[in-house]
Amino acid sequence: MINKLGIGFVGGGFITRFHIKSLLSVRDCDVVGVMSRTKASAEESAALARSIGVGDEAKAYNTITEMIADPKIHALWVCSPNFTRIETFEEIVNSISSSKGELIGVTCEKPLGRNVAEAKKVLELTRSVELLDGYLENQVFSPSVTRGKEIIWARGAATTGRPYLARAAEEHSGPHMPWFWEGSLQGGGVLNDMMCHSVEEASFMLTEPGKPRNSLIPISVSAHTDCLKWQRPEYAKILSENSDGKTDYLTRPSEDFARALVEYLDEEGNKLIVETTTSWCFVGEGLRLSMELFGPEYSMFVNTLDPDLKLFFSRSVTGAAGEDLVEKQNAESGGMPVVSNEAEVYGYTAENRHMVQSFLARKRPEENFSDGLNVTKLLMTAYMSAEQGKTIPFPPPDLDTFVPAVARGEWNPKEN
């Protein structure tokens, strides 16, 4: 029995560094290693772990197999790009099945797969070597969300009835890395990139505490997608320049706006609604996460751009552009909200604490790959709905083989 979990990260980029910073507030774990497609990013993330004291001996590894072979690593956090998902898990399984090393479990950042077939494959591969699995959906661990749910259900729902409408939104000005903008690499546009958060968070809020997520049954999905900003010539040019000409939003865009409405039935046949909105064309202070919950005699509101700290800088205050106040920060002057501890506020700290404690106890985490697969099924149904322009009963036929037109490079709203 081990008392401290050794973690190896697959991927050394932005999201890995977010996870590493969150581990400052998580006990009984150490970052042992980082492996990335680019050795420099692995070394940078390993150096971060050493510098903040969450992995004194953290180092860069050349391959996933090399990390699995290290007996000090007990679990992997998969934070590599979407288009590497299957090859990543195939290497994990091959390493374990060929006795290169052992693991307790593996976690995976969203989405579990770019489509249902990939998400199913990830789950099947993980089960084939009997690994515990954790789906890294940080927003269901956000303190404002979990505390709000606790109070709403204990007071509002207990006296006047269960909540029936949840709204969730995630909006910012667009991803950092060029591959995120490519439908074929990422699996879609903003719907696949960010609605995975909103759908899972909202359904979590509507699920009665102590009951499994499948106590809510999705019955239909209605969605709309569009490209409102980034297909305009002046903005398409920016994307092209940032990707050395690879990203062409004039002829091969991905959606930068998406909305969806998912209808559910609870165990008593009551209809519940999840309403989600996501955007890469939001112009504001920075990343905005919002959550609303409504019941017969109560409501709940969360907005991450309404924090407990705000600053003001006049025109005379100048400096380099950055993201030191809030993720996806869009300005350096005027009235500015500050998210003082993003890893905590966005749920990464509580998420990783739960994953570490679950693996040490040899228990499957409460948020796991089955949840990731279910989210992917809803997202693909949303793409179907948007493409067909109608509400789609859930689950639709041929969902397992469906690949959105945007992921095939065949979607262009200006031609429709």
Image (spheres, grey):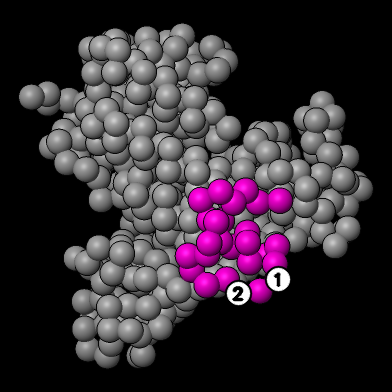
Given residues 323 and 370, the one toward you in this image is 370
Given residues 9 and 152, the one toward you in this image is 9
Dot 1 lies on which element?
Answer: loop
User: Which percent across, then down, holds residue 384?
Assistant: 63, 61
- Can the viewer see residue 293 in this picture? no
Q: Which mark is residue 389?
A: 1
Report the quarter where the C terminus lies.
bottom right
- Residue drawn 47% across and 65% down? 395
- Residue drawn 42% across and 24% down? 90
Q: On the rendered structure, is 336 left or right of 140? A: right
Q: On the rendered structure, is 401 left or right of 17? A: right
The amino acid type of the residue labelled 2 equals Thr
Given residues 224 and 194, the one toward you in this image is 224
Above/below status of 272 relative to 399:
below
Dot 2 lies on which element?
Answer: loop
- Residue drawn 30% across and 63% down? 213
The amino acid type of the residue labelled 1 equals Gly
User: Magenta stretch?
Assistant: 379-405
Q: Quadrant of residue 63?
A: top left
Above/below status of 377 relative to 350:
below
Q: Quadrant of residue 229?
A: bottom right
User: Which percent across, then down, holds residue 180?
Assistant: 65, 39
Q: Is residue 260 magenta?
A: no
Q: Which mark is residue 391?
A: 2
Cα distance in 3D space between marks 1 and 2 = 7 Å
